[in-house]
Amino acid sequence: MFKSLKNIETAFQLTRLLSILTVIVCAVIVIYIKYSSDKMIAKEREKIYVLDKGKSLMLALSQDMSQNRPAEAHNHVRMFHELFFTLSPDNAALNHNIQRALYLADRSAYDYFNDLKEAEYYRRLISTNTLQRIQVDSIKFNFEEYPYEANTYAQQFITRGSNVTTRSLITTCYLENTIRSENNPHGFLIIQFKVLENKELSREKRN
């Protein structure tokens, strides 16, 4: 009788121990799964995706957004200037470049564009068959304060039928973070855009 009770008590204790161990193992598994999934989600959020010629998404080489932001800022400012100041004497191509550039900036860039338009700058460029291109020499940033200040140093080359004019171009602006989109893949917005200098450096006759 006592032996049977002792066996029942031992079996009960063993069952309880197995139950506790099972609960502990299950808890450890759940915690590990949650940790692994959180780590995976965080890692995915650090990845950057870019459009490949507007057709498909490609994973950028950099896996760390914080490390890649300065490079993206540099590309954003360079892209804006190349689109905004590279102009051909073709109305459709000119407007296409300007519209793409304005997606990257706020009202300050549009106001500068509107001033040039009202001064008939673009009309004269088309009517005289003038080609304008830009060469960005350097872009200096201040990433210590937000929004980030950017100063761009470039040269403009204005090609007319009889001559080629070289002009200096110095601009300043600030960068704010914004939502990434097809029209704004870097997720920056140029604000307070200003042209500080745009003067003629040389003029050479064409052969």
Image: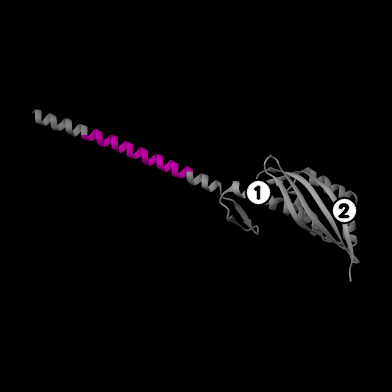
Q: Pointer 2: residues within 10 angstroms few (<14), some, or many (20+)?
A: few
Q: Position of residue 105 (x, y in %)?
A: 74, 46
Dot 2 amino acid type = Lys
Residue drawn at x 33%, y 39% as measured from the top left: 25
How many numbered discs?
A: 2
Q: Is residue 92 above or below residue 104?
A: below
The Cα–Cα distance between marks 1 and 2, rounded to whole angstroms, is 29 Å
Which badge, 1 or 2, comes first in the chain's sequence? 1
User: In which quadrant is the N terminus drawn?
Assistant: top left
Mark identifier at residue 100: none
Dot 1 amino acid type = Pro
Q: Is residue 99 above or below residue 14?
A: below
For this view, does 122 lie left or right of residue 36?
A: right
- Residue 165 falls in image quadrant: bottom right
Residue drawn at x 62%, y 54% as measured from the top left: 50
Q: Position of residue 51 (x, y in %)?
A: 63, 55
Q: Is residue 185 visible?
A: no
The stretch drawn in magenta includes residue 157: no
Secondary structure of residue under mark 2: strand
Residue drawn at x 18%, y 34% as measured from the top left: 11
| Region rendered in magenta | 14-38
For this view, does 95 lie left or right of residue 39?
A: right
User: In which quadrant is the C terminus drawn?
Assistant: bottom right
Residue drawn at x 44%, y 44% as measured from the top left: 36
- Residue 58 falls in image quadrant: bottom right
Secondary structure, magenta segment, majority class: helix
Q: Which residue is mark 2?
A: 199
Farthest residue in the left direction? 1
Q: Which residue is mark 1?
A: 70
Q: Nearer the viewer, residue 205 or 131?
A: 205
The stretch drawn in magenta includes residue 24: yes
